[in-house]
Image (tube, rainbow, N blue to C red):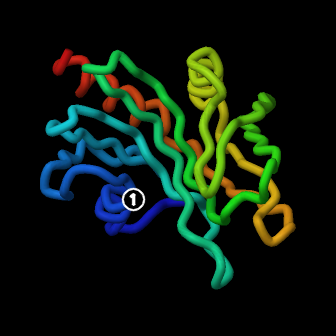
Amino acid sequence: MRRFAVLPLALALLVPGAPLAARDSLGIFGDWGSFRDPEVPRCYAIALNEQHHGKNNAQGFTSIGTWPKRQIGGQIHIRLSRPLASKSRIRLSVGNHRFTLTGNGTDAWAQDKAMDAAITAAMRSASAMSVTAVSDQGRHFTDRYSLAGVASAMDAATLACAKQR
């Protein structure tokens, strides 16, 4: 599903940190955007979830970040559309691959660097991914993402931050 012209602005506003003016757009690739924040420095690929229904749902997103000065690359962060129930299991499905994530509140992450690497590798060869959990209201929910353009967006972010090492 293609996003409209507001995608770059919407994506940039979702990632907290430095002011919007400090973020450089690296490009929009399919359903994913890629940005660089030279103040931190950090670079990231990001996409909004495909559904945003109901008054209690927030706009979810997934980002893959690189922080060259911290020697962190390919770190997955998922902002869920609903707050998690206490001790909810967070399941990520990427194509035929399944992962159990860690998280709390509205945030989820891979359990370690090896899982980050496995998830990003799976994202490169899949067309869609979904995150399933139980909300603090006791209901199962699923956030879905198109992976169209994710490989190019990840590559753009990685290359942009490689120059800052």
Query: Which image quadrant for residue 135?
Result: bottom right
Under mark 1, the amino acid is Leu
Q: Is residue 118 above or below residue 99?
A: above
- Number of on-image labels: 1
Spot occupied by residue 29 in the image (x, y as percentages of width and height): 39, 44
- The kind of secondary structure element at disc 1 is helix
Q: Is residue 56 above or below residue 135?
A: below
Query: Which image quadrant for residue 51?
Result: bottom right
Q: Which residue is mark 1?
A: 14
The residue most toward the front is 86
For image coordinates 37% across by 47% down, the residue present is 33
Q: Quadrant of the N terminus?
A: bottom right
Residue 2 appears left or right of 147: left
Q: Quadrant of the C terminus?
A: top left
For image coordinates 62% across by 64% down, the residue present is 81
For image coordinates 76% across by 39% down, the residue present is 93
